[in-house]
Image (cartoon, rainbow, N blue to C red):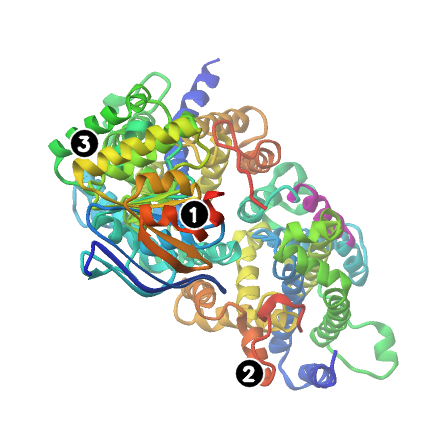
């Protein structure tokens, strides 16, 4: 990370820490969701952006993480903060297991299979034979966690929304730093090599099967953690929240934000959180029409997404045409 | 035993609808090597068009014909305007455009026609009913078979059909004999959209008309197309019938109706892993 | 000299790789011209360039009209039939369907039927296999099919890319004799790209020799055959 990037990041983190004290509770809640989506999008980006495996079904992993947290809290009495690593672990394994058969599916067919997974998710979640855990059609209600006692004892007064925000922010920072290490190191380069020229990567001795399955696992883990955090924030999980349209929302997020980009996850999260709020004023259908137009528009006009545009503007002409999204860039 | 017969025949009826949609998918795949994720929404949109015409007072069959024509035009326009720019783009770009199309069609339908569920008429007289099949099931099966027969005749025996087959198989050689390959693709999309419209109008009386009615059916159609072989039209038809029967039998006697969609998921993933070329498709060899 | 086909300053590239560096040549009506050269000299690219299958710069005129920059299918409709490298057979369609496709742009059904019979006359083996899938035909038969398909266009000019490739010498003789006959009967001009220089020079009236994307020798076939440098480089003696 060069000095400029570090400075910008630190500034962002500082601003992020100030936000909950200047925003209303509702806005803080929205900001929390932006962070949650950013984590989910980072997960999807690792798989689709950096590694080129198209997933139209990441909503499924989000749902698994969300339900894992909800069930653990509701029926297992597990404290909210402990559900996060468990949800992450469950999704890591689930993702890796899905990644193994996915090895045999290329591009379009993987998209097809993950699409099928996404469409089937609500019926699976509503199924009678697991109803006593999942709550069936009605889902599960979660109680919002209170700020921990040690905080009050230290003299810091936060309300529940603010505490949740910082909790999610801390996890997001950890995950983003981990993500940065992943994509800018050897593993990231291997993932990109596999995306750009699979056969050549194999010929170079990269164990493509292992990397691709791991990418699936890690990607699912990120999105699953996001799901768990999201469930806690929204205080509710129900099957119809996890339809194929959730997966499509994530796709919109990474296309608009920028593929193969960490900052893209943040831009995309802002987009998918706030555009529906604004578009909803026009009509119920409008948010999706907007998403659709942006999806197609970005493919034609801005294939590198918002992150690519920002990069192009800030890099300027000095460095000439870089390899757009080919490298693991922030 | 009677119950099995009911489910079997009902399965054939819905299977014929899956077969039509699967055929539309295969037609586009043969020509472009792309899977049209928006096929279901295109069919749904066309069905809404039919509904508006019927609601405005037009008779069923005139509305049917006008809708099929309208769907054809819509398909051609979509190919020329939305798909053509990304025909040779990387897979992810194409998938994103298809999903964008899906989403736009879905939301525009919701916006114009609202999300309240509507009923759609069945034009088949009660006299058509058989012992184990309702009039609509018989009618849907007959209509689908008729459409398939017409398509078969068109592709096998007309010059335009031959040109379209040629363009799908070998676009370079087709250009060398003067075939305007771009327009063949557009025509293919138009035909696929028209076939999808028929499927939509046949299924709407059963599942009721709402913007999300086709997503499950699209999944069954995917399963059917893969099972039969994604580049085999005959396979798609057979696959559709098999999937319809399987769905009904499993749903009624094994896993219950709410999990029927999982059958499609299992079929899709299963076929892709075990035998990606399906029963009648050709094996793809990728060049290094 | 205004001929059927005039090429001036033709340049062509595949992406960043430039293959033709300024080709100049002409073909007269009803003539058979051979384009000779080693592997990689740009022979196939020249034919592709004429048909608009690659991006080009420079001028290509057919019957005095500019055709460079036009689309392949439009150039075909003007009366240029290309028998491509690898034959370009529609493998999953039948032999007869392949021939029908050759005549796709023609409106006159009676003439089409006549020409179909004419092709079967030249190549009886195709008639035997008319309902077979073209992919099941042998190499030689597919070559005959490719030539017939091109002729079904009723072209004024036929471009043939290595018609002898992969064929036994006897079959090549048979094919070239038929090409001669076709040229004599219907006056179709032919541009023949061949590595097999000896056979090509026997068939052709004129010849051009290409090296690295440029014409380096031009003349009648007889002259080229006797040209020392050509003999040593391409004829092996």
Is mark 2 in CB contact (under 8 Å) with mark 1? Answer: no
Q: CA distance from mark 3 to mark 1?
A: 41 Å
Which disc number belongs to residue B36?
1
* Disc 1 packing (10 Å; few <14; some 14–19; many ≥20): many
Q: Secondary structure at mark 1?
A: loop
Tell whether B223 sits left or right of C110: right
Q: Position of residue A101 (x, y in %)?
A: 67, 41
Which disc number belongs to residue A313?
2
Q: Is residue B195 visible?
A: no
Q: Position of residue A134 (x, y in %)?
A: 67, 46
Q: Secondary structure at mark 2?
A: helix
Q: Position of residue A137 (x, y in %)?
A: 58, 47
Closer to viewer: mark 3 or mark 1: 3
Q: CA distance from mark 3 to mark 2?
A: 63 Å
Q: Is residue B182 magenta?
A: no
Q: Quadrant of residue A58?
A: bottom right
Q: Position of residue A171 (x, y in %)?
A: 76, 69
Image mark 1: chain: B
Q: Main secondary structure of the magenta part?
A: helix
């Amino acid at each position: 990370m060069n000095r400029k990037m570090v400075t910008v990041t630190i500034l962002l983190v500082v601003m992020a820490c100030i936000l909950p004290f200047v925003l209303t509770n509702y806005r803080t809640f929205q900001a929390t969701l932006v962070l949650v989506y950013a984590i989910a999008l980072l997960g999807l980006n690792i798989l689709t952006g950096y590694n080129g495996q198209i997933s139209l079904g990441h909503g499924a992993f989000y749902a698994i993480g969300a339900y894992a947290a909800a069930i653990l809290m509701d029926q297992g009495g597990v404290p909210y903060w402990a559900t996060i690593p468990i949800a992450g672990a469950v999704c890591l394994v689930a993702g890796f297991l899905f990644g193994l058969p996915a090895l045999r599916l290329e591009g379009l067919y993987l998209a097809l299979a993950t699409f099928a997974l996404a469409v089937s998710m609500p019926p699976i979640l509503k199924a009678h034979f697991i109803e006593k855990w999942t709550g069936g059609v009605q889902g599960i209600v979660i109680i919002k966690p209170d700020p921990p006692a040690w905080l009050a004892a230290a003299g810091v007064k936060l309300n529940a929304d603010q505490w949740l925000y910082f909790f999610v922010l801390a996890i997001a920072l950890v995950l983003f730093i981990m993500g940065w290490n992943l994509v800018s190191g050897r593993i990231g380069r291997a993932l990109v090599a596999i995306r750009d020229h699979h056969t050549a990567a194999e010929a170079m001795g990269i164990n493509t099967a292992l990397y691709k399955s791991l990418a699936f696992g890690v990607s699912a883990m990120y999105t699953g953690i996001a799901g768990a955090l999201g469930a806690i924030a929204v205080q509710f999980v129900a099957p119809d929240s996890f339809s194929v349209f959730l997966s499509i929302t994530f796709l919109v997020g990474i296309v608009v934000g920028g593929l193969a980009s960490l900052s893209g996850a943040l831009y995309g999260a802002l987009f998918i959180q706030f555009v529906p709020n604004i578009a909803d004023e026009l009509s119920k259908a409008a948010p999706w029409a907007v998403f659709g137009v942006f999806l197609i528009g970005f493919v034609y006009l801005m294939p590198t997404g918002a992150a690519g545009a920002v990069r192009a503007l800030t890099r300027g002409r000095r460095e000439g045409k870089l390899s757009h999204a080919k490298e693991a860039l922030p | 035993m009677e119950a099995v017969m009911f489910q079997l025949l009902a399965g054939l009826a819905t299977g014929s609808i899956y077969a039509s949609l699967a055929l539309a998918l295969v037609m586009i795949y043969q020509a472009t090597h792309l899977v049209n994720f928006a096929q279901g929404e295109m069919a749904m949109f066309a069905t809404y068009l039919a509904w508006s015409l019927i609601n405005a007072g037009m008779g069923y069959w005139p509305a049917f014909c006008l809708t099929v024509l309208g769907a054809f035009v819509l398909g051609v326009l979509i190919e020329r305007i939305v798909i053509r720019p990304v025909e040779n783009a990387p897979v992810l770009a194409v998938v994103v455009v298809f999903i964008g199309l899906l989403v736009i069609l879905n939301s525009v339908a919701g916006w114009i026609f609202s999300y309240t569920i509507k009923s759609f008429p069945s034009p088949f007289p009660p006299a058509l009913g058989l012992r184990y099949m309702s009039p609509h099931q018989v009618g849907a099966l007959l209509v689908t078979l008729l459409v398939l027969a017409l398509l078969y005749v068109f592709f096998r025996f007309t010059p335009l059909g031959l040109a379209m087959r040629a363009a799908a198989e070998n676009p370079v050689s087709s250009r060398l004999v003067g075939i305007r390959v771009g327009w063949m693709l557009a025509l293919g999309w138009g035909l696929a959209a028209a076939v999808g419209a028929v499927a939509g109008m046949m299924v709407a009386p059963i599942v009721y008309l709402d913007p999300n009615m086709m997503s499950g059916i699209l999944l069954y159609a995917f399963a059917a197309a893969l099972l039969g072989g994604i580049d085999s039209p005959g396979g798609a038809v057979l696959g559709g019938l098999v999937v319809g029967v399987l769905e009904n039998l499993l749903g009624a006697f094994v896993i219950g109706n709410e999990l029927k969609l999982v059958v499609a998921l299992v079929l899709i993933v299963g076929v892709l892993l075990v035998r990606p070329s399906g029963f009648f498709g050709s094996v793809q060899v990728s060049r290094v | 000299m205004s001929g059927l086909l005039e090429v001036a300053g033709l340049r062509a590239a595949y992406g960043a790789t430039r293959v033709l560096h300024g080709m100049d040549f002409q073909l007269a009506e009803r003539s058979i011209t051979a384009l000779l050269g080693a592997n990689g000299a740009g022979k196939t690219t020249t034919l592709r360039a004429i048909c608009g299958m690659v991006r080009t710069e420079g001028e290509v005129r057919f019957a005095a009209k500019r055709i460079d920059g036009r689309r392949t299918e439009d150039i075909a409709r003007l009366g240029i039939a290309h028998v491509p490298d690898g034959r370009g057979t529609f493998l999953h369609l039948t032999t007869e369907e392949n021939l029908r496709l050759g005549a796709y742009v023609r409106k006159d059904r009676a003439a089409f039927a006549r020409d179909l019979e004419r092709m079967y006359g030249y190549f009886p083996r195709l008639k035997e296999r008319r309902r077979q899938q073209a992919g099941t035909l042998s190499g030689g038969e597919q070559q005959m099919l490719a030539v017939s398909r091109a002729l079904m266009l009723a072209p004024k000019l036929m471009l043939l890319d290595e018609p002898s490739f992969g064929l036994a010498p006897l079959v090549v003789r048979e094919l070239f004799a038929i090409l001669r006959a076709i040229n004599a009967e219907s006056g179709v001009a032919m541009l023949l790209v061949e590595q097999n220089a000896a056979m090509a020079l026997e068939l052709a009236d004129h010849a051009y020799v290409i090296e690295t994307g440029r014409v380096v020798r031009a003349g009648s076939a007889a002259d080229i055959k006797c040209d020392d440098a050509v003999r040593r480089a391409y004829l092996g003696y």
